[in-house]
Image (spheres, rainbow, N blue to C red):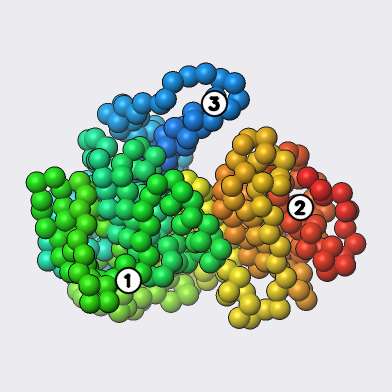
Amino acid sequence: MIDVLVIGGGPAGVVAALRAADSGANTALITRDEFGGMAANDGPVPVRTLAHAARLIRESRQLGRYGIVVGEPVLDYQRLLERVREVVDDVRAHSTFRRQIDSVNVAVHENTGCARFVDPHTVETASGLRLSADKIIICTGGVSRRLACPGSEFTATHSDAWALTCVPPSMIVIGAGATGAQVASIFNAFGSNIQLFHAGPRILPTEDEEVSVAVAAAFRESGILVRENFGVIESFAKTPAGVQMTFTKDGNRESVEASVIVSAIGWVAETSTLDLAKANVETNKRGFICVDEFLRTSALHVFAAGDVTGRLMLVPQAIQDGFVAATNAVCGLTLKLPDQAAPIGSFTDPEYAQVGLTETKARETHEVITAIIHFDSTTRTIIDGRTDGFCKLIVDRETRQILGCHVVGERAVEITQVAAVAMSGNMRVDDLARVALSFPTYAGVLGRLAATVSRQLNLNVNPGRIL
Ligand SMILES: Cc1cc2nc3c(=O)[nH]c(=O)nc-3n(C[C@H](O)[C@H](O)[C@H](O)COP(=O)(O)OP(=O)(O)OC[C@H]3O[C@@H](n4cnc5c(N)ncnc54)[C@H](O)[C@@H]3O)c2cc1C
């Protein structure tokens, strides 16, 4: 019997296996597909590559403004897909995790097909591999939630969207969370006629309200038809030119049609084939594996990490989970999940990003002071001709702690990294105002905001932040 068996080769599983082996455990990792999981093969890496192509298209449209004369950009989608494959291979080939995991002799079994429990300590894979372990860490990630209505088999998921061999003339995207917004934004840049349907009152519902409003306005401006509060879907049907969706709102029935309909209505745990009952591992109402603060499941020898637990479903959190779960599996219950600033962002056009509390949430529990700077008044954005957007800082009036930062516009994701570092380091707003951030930079807006808030609080900081 081995000491630790990790199921799933995404960021959570890879770090869990590495940490278990580093801690002295005889460790094996099995994964249904290739090493790297969704992050490398189907999520952030391919998506970012497509988003970069979309960025290049919009950058190229600026060239004339700076006196550089070229023609209208033409997208060779086949070549772009080749580039996506090159990037995925390149990232995988340069994975330091792979080298590290091999160097500590973790037995890695890739492409095993689905694994399932046959008893509490034994797992069997579709490929016929059978392994028993003292401790097991489940890191099987998640999958797109499917719509449950007639004809839903005619809809695609984000994975199908990336696999398209040509840019569809038109696309309906259902669900305007992070994934739906990205699909809509990328294919809009590639020339598809996009309709973005969102059941709730505002797109990007977990973002600060001002961010949702600004991104929706920018999407509309760029030609995306954004339909919030659209009603309830009744059915889908195949048509000669694509797929038709029928929905009702306030008793009125309407039909819309597009070449492709992409459903991006959420994420569920990938546990369907694991036969968790054989190991007495319980799931919650939403289907995610229940874990305690040590990432231990209802079975005391089984841990779970990453998307399969349904917390913040992002790569950094999956990595952190893998480390915590493996530490506790090997060394006993010694490490709790830290309560840390978690920056989240998306590479849409415009980009948006956040860290910490939204203004509404912050006001529920704090006396807050906020400041906003619009990108039409910061030097770098003016230089780069990227003057749409804003950065908002939310600060506790009494403690001066930074509670949240929300950005829409160019380099939004990078700007929030700086805010996250300040928050993680427990910097007060006046501490941040004293950092001499480089000029002219995108992140420099944070220094200016911090100085603005500090001044409003009558704190003694350098008043020179006017840029
Ligand atoms: C379109 C998209 C864009 C994203 N963009 C970002 C981003 O920009 N930044 C970010 O931080 N996050 C992003 N994410 C989320 C991120 O990809 C996930 O949070 C992360 O991959 C979760 O890691 P994980 O290890 O928990 O699961 P996964 O990466 O999903 O890995 C799970 C692994 O388990 C294996 N597996 C599943 N079932 C079984 C089984 N029964 N037996 C054996 N193996 C199994 C799979 O083959 C896979 O290797 C994005 C996701 C999507 C869909």
| Residue 459 visible in the current orientation | yes
Residue bearing the label numbered 1: 288
Assign the C terminus to one quadrant of the image.
top right
Disc 3 packing (10 Å; few <14; some 14–19; many ≥20): few
- Which is nearer the eye, 318 or 373? 373
| Tally of numbered tags | 3
Q: Is residue 78 left or right of residue 91?
A: left
User: Could you say where residue 462 lies in the image, as x and y percent from the top left?
Assistant: 88, 53
Nearer to us: label 2 or label 3 = 3
Instruction: Report the residue at 52% width, 53% height from top.
Output: 352
Mark pair 2, 3: CA separation: 29 Å
Q: Amino acid at mark 1?
A: Phe
Q: Nearer the viewer, mark 1 or mark 2?
A: 2
Q: Is residue 102 left or right of residue 431?
A: left
- Determine which residue is flagged by label 2: 448
Which residue is found at the position 84% from the left and 62% from the top? 455
Locate residue 361, reporting x and y percent. 57, 75
Vertical placement of residue 264 versus 171, above or below: below
**Pointer 3: what residue?**
63
Callout 1 secondary element: loop
Q: Position of residue 231 (x, y in %)?
A: 29, 71
Task: Name the amino acid type tagged 2.
Answer: Arg
- How far is the residue under mark 1 from the one under mark 2? 42 Å
